[in-house]
Amino acid sequence: MNVNSFEEDLCVLPNNPPLLQTKRMPGNKYNSSPLTPRTRLERLLRERELRKNRSFLQNEGEPDFFASESFLNASESWGQIDEEEFAGTRSSTDNGERLEGRCKQRLLVVANRLPVSAVRRGEDSWQLEISVGGLVSALLGVREFEARWIGWAGVNVPDEIGQKALTKALAEKRCIPVFLDEETVHQYYNGYCNNMLWPLFHYLGLPQEDRLATTRSFQSQFDAYKRANQMFAKVVNNIYEEGDVVWCHDYHLMFLPQCLKEYNNNMKVGWFLHTPFPSSEIHRTLPSRTELLRSVLAADLVGFHTYDYARHFVSACTRILGLEGTPEGVEDQGRLTRVAAFPIGIDSDRFVRALELPQVQDHINELKERFAGRKVMLGVDRLDMIKGIPQKILAFEKFLEENPSWRDKVVLIQIAVPTRTDVPEYQKLTSQVHEIVGRINGRYGTLTTVPIHHLDRSLDFHALCALYAITDVALVTSLRDGMNLVSYEFVACQASKKGVLILSEFAGAAQSLGAGAILVNPWNITEVASSIGYALNMPADEREKRHLHNFMHVTTHTSQEWAATFVSELNDTIVEAQIRTRQVPPSLPIKGAVDSYLQSNNRLLILGFNATLTAPVDFLGRRGGQIREMEPKLHPDLKEPLKRLCDDPMTTVVVLSGSDRNVLDDNFGEYNMWLAAENGMFLRLTTGEWMTTMPENLNMDWVDSVKHVFEYFTERTPRSHFEVRETSLVWNYKYADLEFGRLQARDILQHLWSGPISNASVDVVQGGRSVEVRAVGVTKGAAIDRILGEIVRHKGLKTPIDYVLCIGHFLQKDEDIYTFFEPELPFESPAGPRANAADHLRRSSISQIPQAKSGPKVRFRKQRSLSSIERKVSNYLTGGIWRPAMRDRMTLNEGSSVLDLRGENYFSCTVSRKRSNARYFLGSSGDVVTLLNELAECPQSN
């Protein structure tokens, strides 16, 4: 699909002015744009503007279906959802879809629980009840998409009749059920999700009690977790249609993105976490850390509430998986998973409208009369360890203790909704809270009043709005919270009162509402008590300024905007990925490479060594990977096929590596091949002696000073090491802490350029996790021409080389070897960054021949007479050492003159999927093993 072109059909909104009549973008056909946006930011700004226009044109009374699971652990919301409001969404949406020109993208929302609870009334009859929860109320009213909800209905349905009846009933509400048996739910939801992931993500750590039993049950719980995610993926795949967006929610479904991509790699998949994501030091304690991170990275877009959570995720991928973190996300073999922050909001209009209802006004008047003459403080939380309820009450106690004049003038209303009442830890927390409340009320209460009103239950929506409206100070003291929407709901209901919000700095909402709220550390009881006093005595003008700041944020950053922004970014991420894909070479067509190999008469195989012919090592070095990499060994599965290839008289094998001569001798001394060490500066046939291709006047005086610098930084950087070679020095920090290693690498470069090499003829080559200093002009591409000349002299070739396979995991500077063999370089093209002196001379001797109609118009062949090659080669042979003069090195271009190479017979291939000058890529050294095995199986000539 061409992402730079636009379809001609128009997506016209009803009554749209001409400005809003826009063309669809392929790959993002639901994102309209009247002009071709040139950058990602331009596309997103255009989409944002169009969303505002659509929202303005939309009938305000037209609701639409969009709801989500009751993620009460992530973002609190206690408003009841009207059954008629929820159920009536389908017909109104259908009417909207019939509007002329309306184009809505299908959004498949996948969460652990459906937004409805099912109660069985008979063998084939079900009663559905709307669930209460954060995302159900937060996302109600989103009109941008045609949504479908996929999740577990919260009930075990073992019989087929019941499953069919429930599926039919849920279909009326655009819900699709995933049926989980009781054992899976126990192991997956109660076990792995609630016992492992939830505590860890909230910094409570893994279970401490009965560690042996936990270890024994962990694997079975994780297996159930994966099995449940695969069941969700199967349901999604069954209803998926091309162009749909799949939005996976929360820690219950971390394995789902990978499962979906296995079904269809082109599926648009986003994943959003509603809890905090812990620092990498916490996450690395999870036994399944690697699998979960890689599974999430299969998504196209990964979203979090705050930048802190996104930063922790990228850091975990960097430190645990060894991947490259970028400002935009995480990159793995050329594929970028975007990681970004999307702070959730609420449907603020719903709360503002509710305050005008007669029943809410009645509640408000009743509460004002009940608490007349007293300031009202409010806490609304789930009764959970992370909510900081004991800390909140203890801080209130300290405030009363230090401010006797306020004891009969303030009341704290604490709504604590019970949850997981069958868990001992929660039962213990409930008893603790009741004990503290009883002690404070007994100490500071009177016969007519008590300072704390504690309710172990939830309130209906109207009562809660009234309570928000009469509150003077809202107190949110979460010890760790993904977002906490209670703070948003309080602000939305404070248009007249303009109360003060005291907000924990450990709640995600602190990053959004921090400017207007009083931020506190809930663990610091003294600080919270002091903040309570400051809030109660705050002047009216300051209260109003703080409220207006927060009210503006709450009413503009709504749940509708949150959802629309996430899906818009996901669609744009797909477009961006298509653009990036064009910069990454395609996968090597192994069958084509083998077929061309069979049909050729004289083959040349140029193979890198490290990460190409070596066995893969554990990146973090937990199993001796660092030691093994410092002493690289040939992949054991390559010994036999490599021997067969080397013994084929029609095949010449060259191992071209940056490693020193001893390493290549140790690994390839028994094979009949050519070895080119230190990027081709040393060369030998394994049956002969080493010769050097270095110019005689090469200056290496800089080596000692650079060595001292590398020694110093190696001592300062744990798990780094450096290697001294005859033509270069390499400092490697692959196994060191990545962030610290980068800082040290930057310091090395600054120090080198300001001192030891400021006037030296050297190149500094910065790799992914290394710094190399080498003599000027030392590259694999510069060496290959001389290597070919020596091969010609030794073998006395009678047939030009008509097949070249070049494979390696090379640094960018060494990728000039790929372009050296390109047989179809335009004759008139100027020498660019990828060109060198050899390229210029090669093009100057190229002859042009006609091409078949199906291919390019012209093809350039590199071919000279073999006799002239041999004559020129003999001119610069002196004794047993080949040491060409600088003049010969720069002007003779002997290697290319033995090539009769057609484009279809040249296969340059980088190892790992990345942007490269190579034509193709292979994923790993394992793929190299597969390819060379297939080549070795080809029949040899006699």
Image (spheres, rainbow, N blue to C red):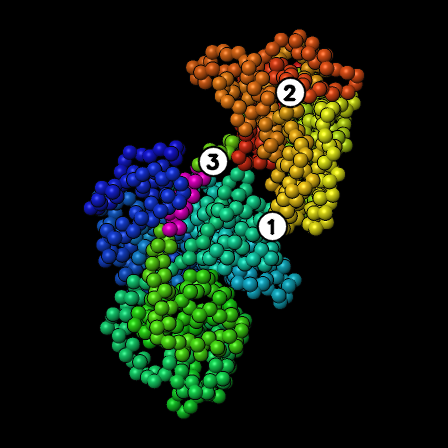
Label annotation for residue 739: 1
Q: CA distance from mark 3 to mark 1?
A: 28 Å
Given this view, does label 1 or label 2 mark the residue nearer the observer?
2
Q: Which residue is mark 2?
A: 890
Which region is colored magenta? 565-578
Indicate which disc, 1 or 2, sits on the residue closer to the N terminus.
Answer: 1
Q: Is residue 760 above or below residue 647?
A: below
Three-letter code, disc 1: Glu
What percent of the width, then of the height, locates residue 669? Answer: 76, 27
- Tell me which numbered mark, 3 or 1, is placed earlier along the sequence: 3
Which numbered circle lies on residue 581? Answer: 3
Quarter holding residue 219? bottom right
Residue at 33 percent across and 34 percent down: it is: 6
Q: Residue at x 56, y 13 (%)?
A: 845
Query: Is 204 one of the magenta-colored residues?
Result: no
Query: Is label 3 or label 1 in front?
Result: 1
Q: Position of residue 829 (x, y in %)?
A: 49, 21
Foreground residue, 472 or 163?
Answer: 472
- Secondary structure at badge 3 equals helix
